[in-house]
Every structure is written in C-alpha cells, then in structure tokens.
Image (cartoon, rainbow, N blue to C red):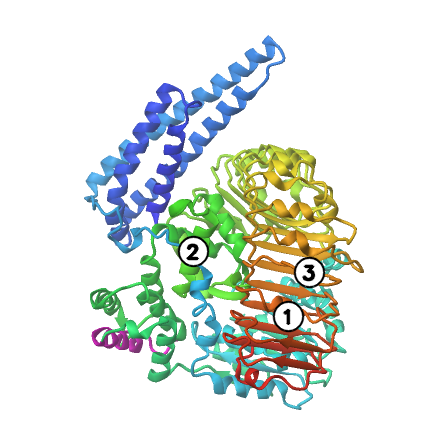
Amino acid sequence: MVDAIVSFAVEKLGDFLAQEVGLRLSIREDVQWLTEELQLMQSFLIDAEEKQSEDRKVQQWVFQINSFANDAVAILETYNFEAGRYSDDGFASRLKACACICRKETKFHKVGKEIQSLKQRITDITRKRDTYGIRSIDNIAGEGPSNRPNNRPSTLRDTTSYVDDQDHIFVGFQDVVERLLDELLKKEPRRHAISIYGMGGLGKTTLARNLYKTPNIVSSFPTRAWVCVSQEYNTPDLLRSIIKSVRGCSNETLEMLDKMTERDLESHLRDLLEQQKYLVVVDDVWHRESWESLKRAFPDSKNGSRVIITTRNGDVAERADDRGFVHKLRYLDPEESWDLFCKKLLDPQVMVSTMESLARDMVDKCGGLPLAIVVLSGLLLHKKGPENWQNVKDHLWKNIREDSVHISHILSLSYNDLSTVLKRCFLYFGIFPEDSEIDADNIMRMWLAEGFIQRGKERMRMEDVAKGFLNELIRRSLVQVAHIHWEEVTTCRIHDLLRDLAVKKALEVNFFDIYDPIERTISSSCLRHVIHGQAQTYLSLDLSNLKLRSVMFFSFCELSLIKLHNQFQHIYVLYLDSRGGSISKLPDAIGSLCHLKFLRLKGIPVLPSSIGNLKDLQTLDLQENNGHPCELPPETANLVNLRHLLGPYSNPLKRINKLTSLQVLRGICCDQWRDVNPADLVSLRELSMDHIKKSYSLNNIRSLKNLTTLKLHCELSESFPALEFLSPCQKLQKLGLEGSIEKLPRSNPFPKSITMMILEYSELMEDPMPILGMLPNLRDLQLLHGAYIGKEITCSDNSFSHLEFLGLRSLHNLERWHLAASAMPLIKGLRIDRCPMLNEIPQRMKDVERF
C-alpha cells in the first residue's frame, strides 16, 4: 500500500518540475534528485511490503518511506504557494515591495533547509535498505496483483447483474425470512423482541434490513427506526438517533436534543412511542448493558410493537426478552454455499472442470459463511484460468485452521489482490462511521480531490474512471450497494468486518487515523484525521506542525474553534458535517486553505466572500440546514476549477458562466438561472433546477450541448413552460420533471437519446403513452404521484421498443391499461403501487417481475 503513497508523491513532484515558473534552479535540481530517488525506491517496496509483517525493522523502514513521501509533497506545496502568492502581489509602494521580498526570501530559505533535510533522510533510508537486505523487484509495470494498472472503468450498465447483493445473501434463508415475518406480524399485542444472532459475516444485518424494508412491514408499522450500537456505543447518542428517526431533524429538535440528559432523552422517546405501533431495529449489540440501557425507552402499549436485535453474542440474544423470539442464524450447507458462489461469479460457464474442482474445494473451506463465499467469488471473478485459481487456493491452504479458512485471510487476500489505486479507494471506506450509508458521488469526489484518479484512456473523464473503480470494488464484494437510482449506485455501505480490515490496513501505512476521544490521541504521522465525535477536544490538540492532507468531521457544532490556516494549511479535503443549530457562518480563514479541492458543509447557512480564493476547489457540497438554503457570495464565480456545485443555495449566482469546468450543478433556483448565458458551460453534464414558474423561459438550456441528466422541479401550484427547449439537447439521457405539465408537445418533443424518464405530479389530462412510446431508446419510465389523471392508457403496436422497467404509482384515476401484442417486447420489471382503480393489468404483464 505504501507504493500508492510513493506513486502519488512521484506524480506531484513531477507536476512541480513541469512548471515553467515557480521553482528556482537550485531547488529544481534538488527536486529532480528526490524524484529520481523515489522512483528508484518503488522497485524495492514490493519486497519490503511482503517482509514487513515478519520483520519490525522493515516495517519501520516502510513507515519512513511513507513519511518521507508525504513530507516531500507538503514542503513543495508550501513553496509553490508562497512563490505564487508573492509573484501575484500588486505592490502599492516600494516599502511594501521590500517587506514582501524579505518575507518571501525568509520563507524560501526555510523551504530550502527543509529540502536539504529531505535529501539527508532519503540517503539514510537508502543505507538502511541495503542493511536490511531489501531487494529490488522490478515489477512496477504491473506483474504482481497489487500493482496491476486498473484504469478500465466498468459502467453500472455492465454490472446490473451483480449490484443486487442483498438477494444473494439470502440464498438458503428464504424460510428464515418467512418465519421472522410471521413473528413480526403475528397478532400478539405485547411488545417483544426478535433476536437474530450468529458470527460476523453470516448476514444478520442484511437479514434485518431485508425485513425492515419488506412492504408488509412498512405498511404494518407506521413508525420505524434503525440504530447501530457497535462496540463503542454512547447511549445518549443512540437515543438521539432514534428520536430523530421518529421526529425528524428540524433545528428546534436538534437544539432541544443537545440540551437533554440521558434520562430526559429516555423519557422523551418513551412519550413519542407511547401511542404508536413501532418497529425499532437495534443492530450490532455487543453487550447486554447496551441493550439494557436502551430498552427502557421502548414502551409496551399492547399494540403489536416490535424490536429486532442483531448480535454476535448468544447470551445477549437469549436474555434480551424473557418472552421474546430468538433465532440463531445458521451456516449455509454445501449446496447452498455453491449456489451462492455461482450467483456471485456472474458467469459460472467460464469454469472448466479443473476450475470447478478448485472452486468447490475453496468454497467448502469457507465453512458456509456467506461473506467469505461472496468475497472469494469476487476475487476469482478477476482471475483467468486454472493456474490463477490454483494460486489462490495455495494461498488459502497456507492459512487453514481446523479444516477451514478463517474469514480474515480471505478478506486480506482479496484486499492484497487490488491494484494500488483500488487499495487507496477501498481504504477510504474505513473513514466513515460503522454501518453508514455512504453517498457514492461523495466518496468518488473525495477520491478525485485526493489525487487518486487520473484521466483514463481516450481522455475519459476522471468521474467516469472513479465510477469504474467503485463498480470494481462492488464486483469484488468488498463494497455493498445500498440504493440504486437510474442505474447508478447512489449510496453504498461496507460490512463491518471489511471496515475493520480497512481501518487496520490504514493504520499500518498511516493512511488515516480515527480520533480517540477517551485517550484524546490521534496519530501525528497520518495524513488524514477522522473525527466521529467530540470535535472540540480534538481541536484542543496541537495540530500546528502537522502536514495533514484531509480532515473529516462527522459531528461538528462549533466552527470558531478551528484555527484553519495554522492547523489545516495543507489539506485537500475538508468534510464538515454539522449537527445544526449553533453555526451561523464559516470563518473567513477558509479562504487561506489554498490547496483545498473538496469542501463539504452541512448546516452552515452563510459562506464568506473569501471562498473565492480557493482556486483549486473541485467540489463545493452544501447540504441544506433543515430546509434553509446556503447563501453563496458573488466570489463563488471565481472558482474556475470547480467541477461540482451542489446546492441548494439562495442568492443569485452572478457570472456563473465563468465556471467553465463545471460538470454538475444542483440546487439552483430558476430565478437565478433565467438571466444566465450558459453557452460557456461546455462541460456541464448534470443540471438540477428548482422553483420553476410557467412565466419563466428555459430556452437557454438549449445551449447545453453536453447535458446528459436534467431534473426540473416546479414551484408549488405552478406549471412548466412549453417543453420544446429540450429537443436540442441531443445527448440527454435522464430526464426528471416534477410539476404540472399542461400537455406534452407532439412534434419532436424529446431528444431520441433519452433512456430514463420520471414524470411526477404532472397532472396530464391526455394519455402520455402514444408520445413516450415513440422514444427509441427509453428503457425506464416512471409515472408517479398523479403524473396522469386520466382513466386509461394505451400502448400501441411497436411502442416502447426498448422499455425494460415501468413504474405506475399513485395514479388514482387510472382504470384501464390497453397493451398491444408487440408493445414493450423487452419489459422485465414492473411496479404498480397505489393505483386503486386499476383492478386488472394486461395478461402478458402478470408474469413480469415486480420491483
């Protein structure tokens, strides 16, 4: 993994050398020498990483290489910033000029001394390398599994057969699901607990999640909540989490909860649940004490309420409820194990008889543990031929204990098989709190900001390369899909055993460290700091001499404590997730973070004008504060490298056309857009716009020639203007229209490129099917919440020639559906929900799978 750190440093030093100005000759020569030394060092890293687990000295040598590479980048960034800052100064007077020159020379002298120190360090590292007998393995071109180039992105369209991980986990468990559903829905009025227990990797959480989302459960329990306990739990925070699930997260609620004691929180939750039929999932309970501290808050109103507990501890399960139901999750039998393996392999026909024999031996040694089986399948999926499968088996057989392979060895083997860039991407998942649903776009944009992603072949967009990496991790079953929308993974998660692996590997190579609020410690040598709680105590530490690359706060409420320039001057990623209520604005010092590329802010209503100084910023992600949009200053238009601007935000953004690198623009209000000339937004691919009125013209959307995704939302009680502006957008693939549409245009209404469409609250009086059925590439159509208020729809011959998925939801007047014999020949998924007058569907649709 350290090779990933060194590779990044080599890339950055190469960038510095490529600059025509900024580097003095003497420093340029030193940087060239350092770069060549690092390049040479890469050939020794493969041998060192293999030896470090058994040799403490080699492990320390690898750590020194890691630290050296990080410091080299940070020092050169400081130099580059100082050179650029002073060269850009317009001197108002000779006195000011002299003062600036003196400061500049002082800074450069300090940087020069630091570079000389680096040269001494690399010389010492080289000497130790020879002493420890670390040999050169000239394998950087990609012979070994961990160094294979892996820039081939795999689109989600290619991976639709594997993203549905949840179904595969339930191979052999269908009877269990039915039994637990019966227990949850039975007429017993007394509130009781259903406990599911078994070792990690058996699928407890996935089983509970499947039950939680079952339509019968959703309709039977008006109030539902989910809380993950884990080993290091905090009872007040758990109670707050459940209350927020029930009440929502308004400012008033958050402020109230922050002031409550544990006893107050317990009493408040009891009051909330007293008159409601509820289902609460208490996931990953490790100790009886944690369940005991929560259960007092769950009242028994004799209305059929239920609690689901998942735990690895049989004693916790058995003692959770004297009259509860306990289910011990079993291991898969050999045939179920083989069935699961083959489903995850995607194409079992690739196995010749020799490969099948090898696979059956390995699956058998997984001991019926589903997580081990799916990760093994994901590993073998990327190995071609019997010889490579034999190599995997040989590795596993070295770690057989009691006739089975411990799951940790399978997970480690799968991790070690990743390319260096995929290792970096995988480790990043360990940053997020346990059992989190992780925004897929969010983590991919963080990868971009960190420099993990390089442009692919044929000038492929870095975002597409990142998407390919995410899908690769999903293929390998190292990452699970949580939600999909329009054939895109929107949120994902990672199993807690795999998260443990990511955290362990990250600590080994100083990739990141998670702040320990009890010991009040965090590694000073890690590039990335993660703070899951008690941010105030973290900020009380002396962070001024650290060269941090990224800082992520997952619970934050007092920005005035951050000494941004002193503590975080080198960072690329700043992730601030506020709990809301107490933050008024972001400090002006945010503008001093000159290297910042990713900035995520939640619950912060106002940005200072200094935000315009962040010339390298790629992503500005503004999560709204309980319905209140953020105020952006006019200087936001100076962010010339901005690729993703994610709202909502309130004030009109003048000169938005200056953002020529912009690819995603979400949350803009229509009254901000109508005066924009978007002709210069040549890179824009996704646009989401709110508060549209019929009186506004949207004709300037015509000039967005590269637009692929468009989502438009009408102001309440308003309707869309005429939709003819859509027809020139010939690359448009995904279209969502929410709001009233008087009628669909009949002549050339929509681009033929559209593959997916959602119409919501459209209130169409005329049957839309004759027009929509002519779209030649439409694969997914959703008519939702009164999109059509007529009584019948007609799909004529040869219409919807490529449609695969159709959704009809909340069309309350729909009575009849006429379907011609040749219409929808490729349909494979149908969802009809809350269409009370539609008593009969076409015979051919009755065998189509429901989704």
Disc 3 residue type (three-letter): Pro
Comes first in the chain, label 1 or label 3: 3
Comes first in the chain, label 2 or label 3: 2
The stretch in magenta equals 353-369
Q: Nearer the viewer, residue 99 or 690?
A: 690
**Numbered disc 1: secondary structure:** helix
Q: Nearer the viewer, mark 2 or mark 3?
A: 3
Comes first in the chain, label 2 or label 1: 2
Instruction: Point out which mark residue 713 bears.
Output: none
Q: Is residue 17 above or below residue 586?
A: above
Give the quarter of the image for residue 212: bottom right
Q: CA distance from mark 2 to mark 3?
A: 37 Å
Instruction: Point out which mark residue 745 bears.
Output: 3
Q: Residues within 10 Å of mark 3 (few under 14, many from 20)?
A: few
Q: Measuring from the top left, give residue 800's x and y in whole percent.
A: 56, 71
Q: Which residue is mark 1?
A: 770
Count of picture labels: 3
Q: Residue at x 66, y 37 (%)?
A: 587
Q: Residues within 10 Å of mark 1 (few under 14, many from 20)?
A: some
Q: Measuring from the top left, give residue 728's x and y in whole percent.
A: 60, 50
Would residue 788 be visible to someone looking at this image? Answer: yes
Q: Residue at x 40, y 51 (%)?
A: 424
Give the quarter of the image for residue 375: bottom left
Q: Quadrant of the C terminus?
A: bottom right
Disc 2 residue type (three-letter): Gly
Q: Which residue is mark 2?
A: 468
Q: CA distance from mark 1 to mark 3?
A: 11 Å
Q: Measuring from the top left, give residue 390's x and y in whole percent.
A: 21, 68
Q: Residues within 10 Å of mark 2 (few under 14, many from 20)?
A: some
Q: Nearer the viewer, residue 269 or 293?
A: 269
